[in-house]
Amino acid sequence: ESTQIGNRKATRSIMNEYGIHAKKGFGQNFLTDPEILDRIVDAAEVTKKDNVIEIGPGIGALTEQLANAASQVVAVEIDQDLIPVLEKTLADHNNVTVINQDILKANLPELIQQQFTDPTKPIKVVANLPYYITSPILMGLLASPVEWTSITVMMQKEVAQRLTAKPGTKQYGALTLAIEYQMDAEIAFNVSRHSFIPAPNVDSAIVVLKQRQQPLTVKPFDKQKLMGFIRGCFAHRRKSLWNNLQSVIDKDAETKEKMIKVLEQLELSPQIRPEKLTLSQFTELLNALYQENL
Ligand code: SAM
């Protein structure tokens, strides 16, 4: 479909008309590449059967394409200066609701119940994220009880690589595992900084997250504890697993002895680096430490 907003000429003229200056503090970089906008909607597989939540509509470039593709779009924008702009740029779309709110403070189940005509339709998140809060936004989406059909989001390329990293690589860490616990993550494509006004200082990538296809091979006794444990194990990523465990667990001699036994049982060398462990191994390790009351 045609792009009325997401191209360089229209974006410049909308910004001029409304006196909009991109706010760094809100991570505002507006997409101005119609092809990229198309590809995002394709990657998200948005259809007329879907409800879409967009985070940070900006001046509406992606919102417009989502409105064309989806049943209904609810767009949550923190910057109140953009609300009157969106009212105008999206005036032709009666299936879009713009909400002036901080997404990090939104009650997502309530928002879905209140804003969508049919809240039982699949719910997909699609966004060109404000990069300064990529992780908190993703963690907030995953912590909510909503079963997202998919989450398709643009972020800094370096963060996208962390989300999809394999064990043993330097990008692999607590964020990778927090995502892997619930979702299958894939980089759909990269986006050059020249596709935005203003151009960000980093290159970007689109990541698609879908509900895990394979159930977890090992279940933790407590999900929150597992996530905290993993963060603790990565606190000093250049140090050994053993060194990191010292700071998450008591240091007395008896505890150390038990810990050595647990590692032996799991065939983990104390000298191994945390980045070598898979999600199952972290889970087995925490479960075993828990059973030993450590
Ligand atoms: N979607 C537009 C586009 O692609 O051109 C704008 C994307 S821009 C990278 C990020 C948007 O998120 C901005 O409009 C910004 O104001 C908004 N934003 C920043 N922090 C937010 C928050 N906490 N809650 C909701 N929106 C936020």
Image: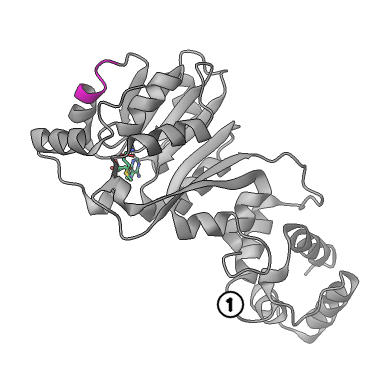
Is 77 situated left or right of 121 in this image?
left
Image-quadrant location for residue 5: top left
Is 101 situated left or right of 241 in this image?
left
**Position in image of residue 185 (x %, y %):** 61, 47
User: Does residue 30 show up magenta in the picture?
Assistant: no
**Position in image of residue 250 (x %, y %):** 70, 77
**Residue at the farthest bottom position:** 253
Q: Residue at x 79, y 86 (%)?
A: 253
Is 122 situated left or right of 263 in this image?
left
Asked whether residue 113 is in view, the answer is: yes
User: Does residue 91 show up magenta in the picture?
Assistant: yes
Q: Quadrant of ligand 1?
A: top left
- Please name the amino acid that badge 1 sits on: His
Q: Which residue is at the front of the view, 129 or 137?
A: 129
Q: Which residues are magenta?
A: 88-92
Q: Which residue is at the front of the view, 294 or 111?
A: 111
Main SS class of the magenta portion in the image: loop
Q: Residue at x 65, y 70 (%)?
A: 233
Is 10 situated left or right of 6 in this image?
left
**Position in image of residue 169 (x %, y %):** 63, 68
Asked whether residue 107 is in view, the answer is: no
Vertical arrangement, residue 120 with respect to residue 76, above or below: above
Q: Residue at x 52, y 30 (%)?
A: 124
Image-quadrant location for residue 177: bottom right
**Residue at the farthest right position:** 265
- Quadrant of the rendering where the N terminus is positioned: top left
Q: Residue at x 40, y 26 (%)?
A: 66
Pointer 1: what residue? Answer: 236
Vertical arrangement, residue 56 with respect to residue 84, above or below: below
Q: Which residue is at the front of the view, 136 or 85?
A: 85
Determine whether the residue tagged by mark 1 lies in a helix, strand or loop. Answer: loop
